[in-house]
Structures are given as structure tokens and as C-alpha cells.
Amino acid sequence: MNIELMREFFGWMTLINLGLYIWTAVMCFFCKGMIYRTHGKMFRLTPEAINAFLYGYLGVYKIFFIAFNLVPWLALVLMT
């Protein structure tokens, strides 16, 4: 596996994960009522607990995205 192939792989992986992150954040913003109703009934959670979980999830996803997708791709781009 050469550097060009790895750069292309990490580029596509970064693009796909960024799209998934943006889609999830937009859905959390626009569908908050549906999320509250669904998870409130399923797990008996308050809206505050659901907010804490969602923002925690988005924060952890962003950290993993940067650490395991964006930084390796940028390093490979700078190497070539």
C-alpha cells in the first residue's frame, strides 16, 4: 500500500465521516421534538438528559473525527 492510496483512502474516509457528522448535527437541531418524544418514551429520559447525551455524543464524535480522520489525511497530504 503506497502513500497515494492511503491519502485517497483517508480523504474519502474524512469526507464520509464529515458528512455523517454534519447530517447528525442538523438532525439533532431540526428534529429535537421527535428525538425528545422517542427517547423520552423509550428510556424515560428528561429533555435535559437527552441534550446532555446528544451534545456529549457530538463532542466525542468530533474529537475522534479530528484525531483519526482529519489529522492523518492532512499529514499524508503534506507528505506528498
Image (spheres, rainbow, N blue to C red):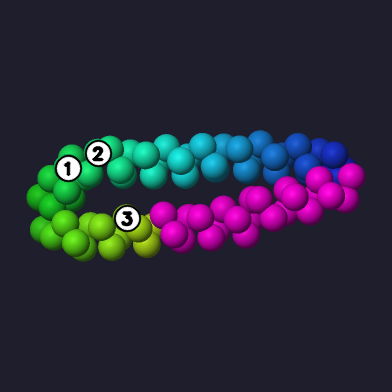
- Picture residue at 63% right of the left edge, 41% below the top: 13
| Secondary structure at numbered mark 2 | loop
Residue 31 is labelled as 2
- Asked if the magenta segment contains residue 10, the reply would be no
Q: Quadrant of the N terminus?
A: top right
Residue 67 is labelled as none
Give the mark nearest the N terminus, 3 or 1.
Answer: 1
33 vs 46: above or below? above
- Picture residue at 54% right of the left edge, 42% below the top: 18
Magenta span of residues? 58-80
Question: Would you say 80 lies left or right of 66 here?
Answer: right
The one of 2 and 23 positioned closer to us in this rendering? 23
How far from the left and from the top, in percent, is residue 36? 17, 48
How far from the left and from the top, in percent, is residue 38? 16, 45
Residue 54 is labelled as 3
Q: CA distance from mark 2 to mark 1?
A: 6 Å
29 vs 50: above or below? above
Quarter occupied by residue 16: top right
The one of 41 and 62 positioned closer to us in this rendering? 62
Question: Would you say 17 lies left or right of 54 here?
Answer: right
Residue 33 is labelled as 1
Give the mark nearest the N terminus, 2 or 3.
Answer: 2
- Asked if the magenta segment contains residue 75, the reply would be yes
